Image: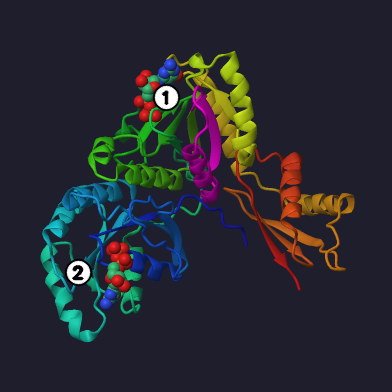
Amino acid sequence: MSDPVTGPVPVLAVVGRPNVGKSTLVNRILGRREAVVEDIPGVTRDRVSYDAEWNGRAFTVVDTGGWDPDARGLAERIAAQAEIAVSLADATLFVVDATVGITDADEEVVKILRKSGKPVVLAANKVDDERTEAEAYGLWNLGLGEPYPVSALHGRGSGDLLDAVLAVLPEPPPVTEKELGGPRRVAIVGRPNVGKSSLLNKLAGEERVVVDNVAGTTVDPVDELVELGGRTWRFVDTAGIRKRVKEASGHEYYAWLRTSTAIERSEVCVLVLDGQESIAEQDVRILQAVRESGRALVIAFNKWDLVDEERRYYLDREIERDLVQVQWAPRINITARTGWHIDRLVPAIDKALEGWETRISTGALNSFLGRLVAEHPHPVRSGKQPKVLFGTQVSTAPPTFVLFTSGKLDAGYERYIERRLREEFGFVGTPIVINVKPRE
Ligand code: GDP
Ligand code: GDP
C-alpha cells in the first residue's frame, strides 16, 4: 500500500447568526467536545479552523462565529462573515435556528451565498425531536434547497447533514498540486503594512495570468495566478474583499480568519516581515499557525532599503530569540518597492517545497536511527532505558514520522531526533512531525 500524500483538503465554512448553534455544531462535526473554545467577549479567538473527517474523507472546518458579540452592526458583520466564508471556502454550511425561523439577517446571508454560486448546505438546527421537525420545513422558503433538520446538541440528524456536506465538497486532492500538475499554492502572509501587496504587485508585474488560459484550473475569485520563472503559481487569497474586512467591526478578527484560512489553503507560506521593525507577537503568532498547519515556509524581510547597520545588529538578535522555532525556514532580504532581490523568492520557495515533499526510505531512516541511538542513547529513567526500535515516514507534506519505541521518550530527546534528522536529510523549509508510539 502506498502512503497517503496529504495536500490541502477542501474547506467548509460554517456561517450563521450568533446563537444559532454554530460552535455546538462544529463540535459535533469534530466529535470532540472541547474543540471549539468558548467565546470570550472582545478577545480574538486563535483557532478558527479544525481538521475534520467523515466517512474517511478529510476536510477543514472553519468556524466563522468568533466575533465580538458586543460589537455593533449585526447585519454588516453577518454580511462580512458570509462574504469571507464563501470566498475562502469550497462550500458553506449555513446554520439557521429552526425554532426561531427566518430573520432579516438570514435573508442577507442568503443573498451573498447565492451570488457566490458555491455550494451551500442548509442546517435547520435545534430540531431536538420529531415535534420540531415541521418547523424545519419553513426554511425551504430561503430558496437554498432542502433544509437538513439537525440537533447539534444531541446529534440527531447530524449523519445525514454530514453526508450532504460531503456530497457538495469537491473531492479532496489527496495529492499535492505538483502531482496534479496544477500551479503550486502560495500564501503571502504577514501583519498589515509590511509590504505584502507591494510584493505581489512587483512579482506579478505585467505577467498576471489570464485565468481562462490555464487549462484545468478553477481559480477562486480571491486567488491570483502569476507567472514566475517560467511557471504559473497560484497566490491564494490576495484580491478582493479587504475593504469589506476593514469596514466590519471586529476587523482584526476577520484579518486573522483570512490569514488562518489562507495558510490552510496553501502549500507554502511566505511570511513577510518589516525589516526595520522589531519582530512582533503577531508575527510569531502567524509562524505558530504555519507550523501547526504543517505548511512549508519562507521568511522574507522586506523594506531592506531601510535597514541600516545598527538595525541589522538588533535584527540578528531578534532572529535568534524569536525565530528559533523556525530556524529551518529559508530567509531572504528584499525590497518589494524596488524589486531588489525578489528574484530570490522562487528559489527559496522551491527549496522549501522540496523539503516539504522529501521522502526518506524506511531502510535509510532505520540505519540512521540505529546510528543515532548508538551514538547518543536515551538517558535512563527510573531504571529503564527507552529505545527507538523502528521508524517509518508515513507521509510527506509535511514529512511525518512514526517511531516505535520501548518507552516514552523525553521531550528533549525528541527534539534531538528532529535536529539530527534535519542534519542528515535536510528538510529545509518544512516542519517535521514525529509521532512516538511506545510499546509498553
Ligand atoms: P453560535 O453562537 O452560533 O456558535 O451558537 P452556540 O453553539 O454557542 O449555541 C448557542 C446556544 O444554543 C447554546 O446555549 C447551545 O447549547 C444551544 N444549542 C446549540 N445547538 C442546539 C440544539 O441543537 N438544540 C438546542 N435545544 N440547543 C442548542
Ligand atoms: P501590506 O499591508 O502588507 O499589503 O503592505 P503594502 O504593500 O500596502 O505596503 C505598506 C507600505 O509600505 C506602503 O506605503 C508601501 O509603499 C511600503 N513599502 C512596501 N515595500 C517597501 C519596501 O521594500 N521599502 C520601503 N521603503 N517601503 C515599502
Residue 153: % across, % down: 33, 76
Residue toward you, 36 or 278: 278
* Quadrant of the image occupied by residue 322: top right
* First reached walking from the N terminus: tag 1 or tag 2: 2
Badge 1 crowding class, 10 Å Cα cut-off, few under 14, some 14 to 19, many 20 or more, is many
- Where disc 2 sits, the SS reads loop
Residue type at the position of mark 2: Glu
* Quadrant of the image occupied by residue 143: bottom left
**Is the residue indicated by label 1 positioned so its CB lies within 8 Å of ligand 2?**
yes
Q: Is residue 336 visible?
A: no
- Where disc 1 sits, the SS reads helix
Q: Quadrant of the C terminus?
A: bottom right
Give how far apart the Cα atoms at labels 1 and 2 are.
45 Å
Residue type at the position of mark 1: Leu
Residue 15 in magenta? no
Q: How many marks?
A: 2
Q: What residue range appears in magenta?
A: 274-301
Q: Identify residue for label 2.
A: 146
- The residue positioned 85% from the left and 54% from the top of the image is 373
Residue 9: % across, % down: 44, 54
In the depicted structure, whether residue 76 falls above or below residue 302? below
Residue toward you, 431 or 235: 431
Residue toward you, 362 or 407: 407
In the depicted structure, whether residue 418 falls above or below residue 163? above
Numbered badge on residue 199? 1
Residue 14: % across, % down: 31, 59
Q: Is residue 106 visible?
A: yes
- The residue positioned 46% from the left and 37% from the top of the image is 186
